[in-house]
Amino acid sequence: MALNVVGGVYREYCVHPRWNDIYGSAGRAAMAIANMGTDVVLHSYMGQHAIDVFEERAAWLEGFSTMPTKVDGIVAFRYLYDLDVPVISGVPDVEYPPLQVDADKVVRFGMLEGDAVVNADWAVYDPQNVRKGKPFGANGSRANHLALVMNSWEAGHMAGMPGEHPSMTAPALAHQQGAEVVVVKMGPHGAFVWTATGTTQVPAFRTGHVWKVGSGDCFVAHFANEWMHNGKSPAEAALIASRATAYYVETQGLITPVQLNDYAPQAIGLSVGYRAGEVRQVYLAGPFFDLSQVWMVEQARNVLQEMGLKVFSPYHDIGLGEADDVVAKDLEAIHASHLVMAIADGFDPGTVYEIGYARALGKPVVVYSERHKGEGLKMMEGSECTICNDFTTAIYSTLWEAVAL
């Protein structure tokens, strides 16, 4: 029996690394499920171009079909880079009439341009919108067996308990929405799986490359496929979903059953101190002599702080000055930090010195450099720095190093 997926089909454009395609949450989830060999039907608002794109995909992907509701235009997400807050365009001034999906098993995503009323025996719901997410049944949707999937911020907001741990928000959401399963994604902590009979903490996995756009869609898709179609327990389904999502993040590809069987990423290790709530400090090394350099430092600092890390930035925390004014403070801050993230493009002498100084102290160093390779990075590679040629990968590598300390 087919899984039915309802939600947004959107254009996605990323400047760097370059990405330009039509997926959206529902489109990507439906493709991910079909790639696992499960029959799937995609329901969404689609313009003619999107219809053509997915009909072409259906022609080569067995068991994949679409039931589009035709509209003019398409909602588009534009990212400068894949961790950026997207600029969204094409959202209609007035929502389209709601889609109606009556089926045995349904995956429902929240949408920007409309809504979906679901009548199902089994359903998985991801509200998507962190500020205006609506409870599953608010629009008349019904399911005999309901699982909710969202991140910890969304869970706290929707439960009316912002900042609380999923052990508090998950049972509250289950009670409020009549769900028998609640899965709360927790970044490096993995996913918290709640059922009426117990809870499980499922790990997240470390990858050599990180592509963020659509990672949450893949998690929902694989959880739904394993829980509703393959009959796995919620904890088993979430663990498989976490592994499958790691594959997507690492390769930008959708995993197949054979690939999933062979794929064995390393679980992210969390130190006792980090689990106990100790904050890790990152020393952010990098030049800040022109606008582009300052912009990069600002971006890295903001994202790392949003991930819960304390960031010491010489630009922000010391400022410009002569050597006698700043160098001792810089080195003292490296001593006081747990690790270093270094923006190394251009091989600024001060940044290179800070990398070597930190390694001499035994501090982990994550080096981000897109321009330099091989011989230019020999000393850094040889001293066991983590080398990343992609900004998002460097950010996540820094986070993963930090939580292990």
Image (tube, rainbow, N blue to C red):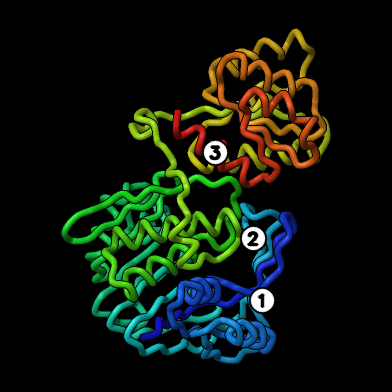
At mark 3, the secondary structure is helix
Query: Looking at the image, is 393 positioned above or below residue 69?
Result: above
Query: Looking at the image, is 2 positioned above or below residue 292?
Result: below
Residue at numbered disc 1:
90
Q: Quadrant of residue 230?
A: bottom left
| Residue drawn at 56 percent across, 43 percent down | 396
Q: Amino acid at mark 3?
A: Gln
At mark 1, the secondary structure is loop
Residue at numbered disc 3:
305
| Residue drawn at 45 percent across, 28 percent down | 405
C-alpha gap between disc 2 and disc 1? 13 Å
Circle 2 residues within 10 Å: few <14, some 14–19, many ≥20: some
Q: Position of residue 243 (x, y in %)?
A: 44, 55
C-alpha gap between disc 3 and disc 1? 31 Å
Q: Amino acid at mark 1?
A: Gly
Name the N-terminal-most of marks 3 and 1. 1
C-alpha gap between disc 2 and disc 3? 19 Å
Give the label on residue 86, or none.
2
**Looking at the figure, which quarter contains the N terminus?**
bottom left
